[in-house]
Image: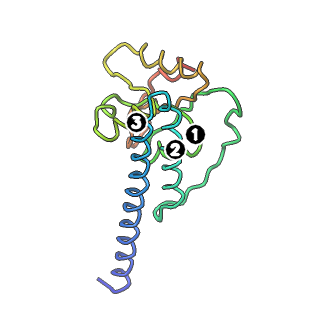
């Protein structure tokens, strides 16, 4: 291995360590804030929790040495009222990017995320909507419709998973709720 290649690998490793450390600090502070919100009372959860997580995700994406983001197309989103934002799901960062593009949204997410210890706490605190596969779709669709009527945006990945090399069949729940 040449010295130049070794130096590139060291810089890459340093950037990765820095990015993971930054993520840990930012999310640690966000989780601490959510715990404080949950102690204050349930009525402060939801919108306040989503704001904390959105700001943490935004801070991470803007400060991370691994990513350079730019937001384009925000002018196409409605200035008032609620809407359903439908996006394909290609990476684990898609949710964070959508929080930057269209804040204050409730995500439709697979129900197992709500049972995961830390992520589940965040999902429940933010009042995201669990998708219950293999059950009647009316539950999540009704929850999305109620959120829209209350003036809250809903974010849906209609493919239901990420990392697919091709577009998977779209589920119809987001379109019915809209």
Q: For marks 3 and 2, give the CA distance.
A: 20 Å
> Circle 3: is it few (<14), some (14-19), or many (20+) Cα within 10 Å?
few
- Could you say which is closer to the camera, residue 145 or residue 35? 35
Judge whether 56 appears above or below 10 on screen: above
Residue 54 is labelled as 2
Classify mark 1: helix, strand or loop: loop
Judge whether 138 appears above or below 41 on screen: above
> Circle 1: is it few (<14), some (14-19), or many (20+) Cα within 10 Å?
some
Q: Earlier in the sequence, mark 1 or mark 2?
A: 2
24 displayed left or right of 145: left
Residue 83 rendering spot, x and y as whole percentages: 61, 27
Which residue does the image show at 31% across and 18% down from the upper left? 134
- Could you say which is closer to the camera, residue 143 or residue 157? 143
Which residue does the image show at 58% across and 27% down from the upper left? 152
Judging by the rendered image, the residue that carries numbered circle 3 is 39
Residue 2 is labelled as none
Judging by the rendered image, the residue that carries numbered circle 1 is 103
Residue 76 rendering spot, x and y as whole percentages: 69, 38
Q: Nearer the viewer, mark 1 or mark 3?
A: 3
Q: Earlier in the sequence, mark 1 or mark 3?
A: 3
Cβ atoms at labels 1 and 2 below 8 Å apart:
yes
Which residue does the image show at 33% across and 15% down from the upper left? 135
């Amino acid at each position: 291995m040449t010295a130049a290649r070794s130096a590139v690998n060291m810089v890459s490793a340093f950037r990765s360590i820095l990015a993971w450390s930054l993520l840990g600090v930012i999310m640690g502070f966000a989780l601490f804030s959510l715990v404080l919100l949950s102690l204050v009372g349930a009525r402060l959860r939801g919108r306040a929790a989503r704001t904390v997580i959105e700001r943490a995700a935004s801070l991470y994406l803007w400060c991370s040495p691994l990513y350079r983001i730019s937001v384009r197309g925000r002018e196409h989103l409605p200035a008032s009222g609620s809407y359903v934002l439908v996006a394909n799901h290609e990476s684990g960062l898609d949710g964070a990017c959508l929080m930057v593009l269209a804040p204050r949204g409730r995500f439709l997410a697979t129900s197992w995320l709500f049972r995961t210890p830390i992520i589940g706490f965040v999902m429940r605190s933010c009042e995201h909507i669990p998708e219950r596969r293999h059950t009647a779709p009316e539950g999540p669709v009704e929850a999305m419709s109620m959120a829209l009527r209350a003036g809250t945006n809903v974010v849906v990945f209609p493919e239901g998973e990420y990392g697919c090399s091709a577009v998977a069949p779209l589920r119809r729940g987001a379109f019915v709720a809209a």
